[in-house]
Amino acid sequence: MAEYIKGWAGRRTFLKGMALGSAALASAGTALLGDRSVDGLGVARAWADGSRHKMAFIQWQPHTVPAAWSKGIEDVLKPQQVIDYELLDGQNKVEVQASLMDTLISQGASVIFLQPIDSVALAPSIAKAKRAGIAVITLNIDATEPHAAHVEMNHYYGAMDIAKAMGDHMGGKGKVAILNAPPGIIIRDQRTNGFVDGLKKYHPQIEVVADQVADWDRKKAQDVLHTILAAHPDLGGVYGVNDSMALGAVDVAKEKGLIGKLVIFGNDGEVAALESIENGELTGTQYTDVYQQGRLAAAAATVLATGGVPATAFAHQSHLLMPYIIATKDNVGSIQPSQRW
Amino acid sequence: MTLRPATAALIFFFAATVAFFCLTAPRFATATNAENLMSGFSFAAILAMGEAFPILARGIDLSIGAIVGVVGMVVFDLTQILHLPGYVILPAALVTGAVAGVINGVLIVRLRLSPFIATLATLAAFRGFVYAISGRQLVPGLTTTPITDPWITGLETYFDLGGALGLTNFIAMPWFPLSFFLMLALFAIFQTLALATRFGRDLYSVGGNAEAARLAGVNVNRTVVAAYAIAGFSAAVAALIMVARFTTSTEALGTGAELTAIAAAVIGGVSFSGGIGSMFGPALGAFLLGAVLLGLTLMGVPQFVQQIITGLILLAAVGYDRLMALARQRRLASNLAEAA
Amino acid sequence: MTQAPLISGRSLTKVYGHLIALRDANLAVMPGEARGLVGSNGAGKSTLIKILTGATAPTRGAVEVAGEAAPLGDPKEMIRRGVACIYQHANLAPAMSVMDNLFLGRQPRQRFGLLDRARQRREALDLLERHGVDLDLDAAVGALPTVQQKEVEILKALALDARVILMDEPTAWLAASEVAKLHATIRTLKAGGVGVVYISHVLDEIFALCDTLTIMRDGCVVAENTVAAIDRPTVVHLMVGEKLARESDEAARQKRRARGSGEVRLRASNLAKRGVFKDVSFDLYAGEIFCITGLIGSKRTELVRTLFGSESFDSGSLEVDGRPAAFSSPSRAIARGIGFVPEDRRREGLMLEMTVTENLAMAMLDRFRQGFMLRRGRMVEAGRKAISSLSIQPPDGTKPVNLLSGGNQQKVLVGKWLNRAPRILILDEPTVGVDVGAKAEIYAILRRERDRGAAVLVVSSDLEEVMTLADRIGVMVAGRLVAVHDAEAVQMDEIVREIGMETA
């Protein structure tokens, strides 16, 4: 190495100079060409002359729900002819979502769709976007920083209606168990509170005897329900806070021959759940047309962007609750194949 | 002090990458993007420098990301549940990180576990610990409550140096985040520690030939534990920066950060065979990775392609490291032949 | 004149598992004394040195420095008390500079705890000048030629200004001029009251330099004397042991079969591997035992591994049974009838968790095959026969092989290959860590193979083994085969001299 380093000494100075020189050039270029953040109205004004809008959806991580949203968003944005849309992946890391927000802001996006991994962690990024005049539309998971719009599945009221339907199926009395998500997630609280409040309102005689965590997971739900059934063999109903957990309950019911006797409801409206309802196993679920959710969000975005409405113009955050149906055997047929996700 | 060829190559590659993206990626050559690079990747540079210490000692710390998670959640709990003041929480966070690092070090020197195995185990254990102490699950309402302690949120401050120096009259300047200056401060401290103290020499000699170091009277165990403690300490600083940025902490904070840290360290010329490298390379390596990610995103390149490219860069760096190691071995062998 | 010895070790014993490396050894050095320490491989010299420098702690015994009891197994403490050592194997950090290595662990500091590089450089330059050495302080040690690396090691020890310096084979890599320089330095140190312990294979050096001599064998100190009062043949005899010396004389008087049946099984011509060995040419005959000996590091293992195909050579040619051979892998070598018993039986030869039978069968599983299945019955039967013919203790084929003693493990390893009746059998240090009884049995096995008509090639550092066993002897020094002798025609002294011969 001695001779290697010595030989570099002469070349070293040259190389150092070249390296530092190009670095200096690059940073000078950066400074010269750059523009600092654009003021809110500036963004809107720039686009009003017919130039293209940039929009992107930052998902949590790859999954059927955000994939369906993205498809719905694309369905609406593409025909507008002036909108460039991109699907970005948060890779389940708040740092990645924040960094993507930063990049989109510096690119001068007009609307950002966001499925925040964490409601608080993304708040500073949303605030930053708002200052730049960029409208942020969140899907399903709200953020603590007020933004342009929040489009969510009707978690709370839908859960109330699930409670009503479940109670009807159970004849107004009996015991129910809840298979729940890990604590600390807003959706979970909304869907659980809605259910509990719904029971209180419509079927006060029905008792919630268990509320256990099954991690959104089908397999875990099976294990958990086994334990619950052991303690309450006369269980009348099970509410899975998402379809996966409800389907896990269905598996257990099939195993123990309780189909028809155990009333099971899920929440989401996945393809697998709808099929299960058609087969007479799952009693029902809250079905939301997720494509439609994407389309509605995109429609709102298009109006904002082409109408030149900056994020700073909002008085407070707007809220859009999705329509839904409580799908049971009677009405599940009305859900078209193209609507299933 | 001579410039290692590896470091010179890194500087050149960094400059070339920046130049490339300035020309091909729209809006890369903007003050905003420079600001995004600093605010988004200073914590990565800090982690990379911290990770360099165990690697210099011929070990590795796979748990550095999990330590970030632990410190983040400790900070969250201390401020949101116990409502301790910020000036108590900041040192507590640093101590937590260092203690976690010491645990790693002790497992390696006392139980004689290989660093890979030991830190793989603590990776899982620390992450589990994060979930166990998670205030967000203990007190559900906290998932929607941001942290407001000024000592913590103050870490996410931006300095308009351009305006202060009057430069904005001529060129647009980015606002410099405090995290960037923290990174620079840590760089200065770590670089001094590594190159100008006896501890630093001991670290390099332990990494280069632990037995020779031991026989020369170096306290190998203490040096190794200190190296891992430093890694834990830098994880704590990184965690504080991230918690300040997000005004909260999540259970998954820092997941996967160890891979970026190790990649940046290797790209920065720290050799897995131990005893080679310094702090400059890892820090620059982290910003190189950041520049590549930002540049590719601005170019609209799909994210999975970005991951492939990042992987290729790492492969090139590792390959270069191996080539250098083989060349050293071959030189050693031919020297033996000369003696014959 | 009752002066306290600079350093003294009393009743030092070191046991590694089953192996007694050192037994009740005593050593003392007076100021101004140069004490030579000799003994064949495995006699315990390095272990004794390691205990005296604190690199290892003894199982029993005590060490005193200048009359005071010293803590055991603490290198830092021993350095502090003025005990320095030049170790046999590379003791430098290759990526660090010469200057850093010279001051390893004790760099001078300034007020704030930062390194005082200026002072370090001044002291280093001063050191170089004092000893007349020319080195580039900033060069990375790993890039230096070995000779210079050795110089750095020597300087590092001298820099400690120690009162006792222990040297383990310090001249192994040095050229004649450097050896002379080192000896001059040692004489200067002696004159200054420093004590020196000097381990070397090269008896010439011992006799030229040292005042006193300690001879070790099989872990024990067998004799101590002044150099003036003893002569070379006596030393050699003491190193090797009377009984074994006699046995080896007897065995030596056995008819040797240099060149065996006259049929050349293997011919190596000008084999070379860049940076490892060169100019290696020899013939190996059927029906003879050819031993290659030399110092550790003379690249004999690397040479025989190329013969077996687990490594490749760069130039030269190899012929087996008259046909050219360039084995790309051991399986090809095996197909041509070559068997190889490697140096490290635990790491490279045996499957430690498997049973004796399974290990014995391993090299020839295809013989036990019928269709797709292994016939266990045949395997067990073959194993039983091998166990009995090799006298493996305990004679239980189902025992996991790692429970056997070293000697029996080695017999299993040899037996593995004997089952295949190889035409060429190569063994690398076959009796390291093997007790005397098993050694004799292994020699008998090898002679049996030779008589059966196999060509046997043995690499060995154990001179007495070589003298006992070989029909012909080859000497390798630093990667070159410098001499080949018929065993009957050569004395051990000559071999010893050739081994210690420095290269021009």
Image (cartoon, rainbow, N blue to C red):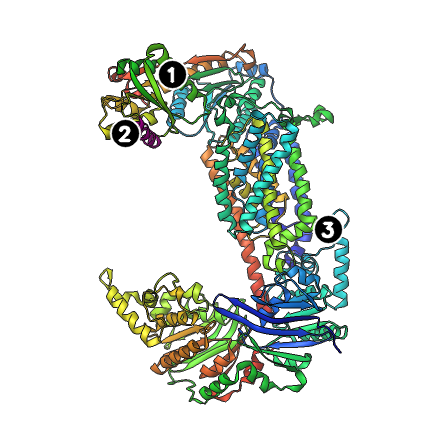
Work out whether residue A128 or residue A119 is closer to the camera in this orientation and state it: A119
The subunit carrying tag 1 is A
Q: Which residue is mark 1?
A: A196
As measured in the structure, the alpha-carbon distance from the residue carrying label 2 to the one carrying label 1 is: 23 Å
Q: Is residue C265 visible?
A: no
Magenta range is A218-231
Q: Is residue C33 left or right of residue A192?
A: right
Q: Nearer the viewer, residue B173 or A25?
A: B173
Report, in whole angstroms, how far the alpha carbon at label 1 lies from the one at label 3: 69 Å
Vertical side of B145 occupied by C51: above or below: below
Q: Measuring from the top left, give residue C366's x and y in whole percent.
A: 28, 65
Q: Which residue is mark 2?
A: A252
Which is closer to the viewer, label 1 or label 3? 1
Label 2: few (<14), some (14–19) or many (≥20) C-alpha neighbours in 10 Å: many
Measured as percent of width and height from the top left, residue C187 is found at: 73, 76
Per the picture, the main secondary structure of the magenta-coloured stretch is helix
Q: Secondary structure at mark 1?
A: helix
Q: Quadrant of residue C178?
A: bottom right
Q: Which residue is mark 3?
A: C115
Same-chain status of marks 1 and 3: no
Is residue B310 shown left or right of residue B194?
left
Q: Earlier in the sequence, mark 2 or mark 1?
A: 1
Q: Amino acid at mark 2?
A: Val
Q: Can you give x and y, in whole percent of width and height, for residue B213 in the image?
A: 63, 58
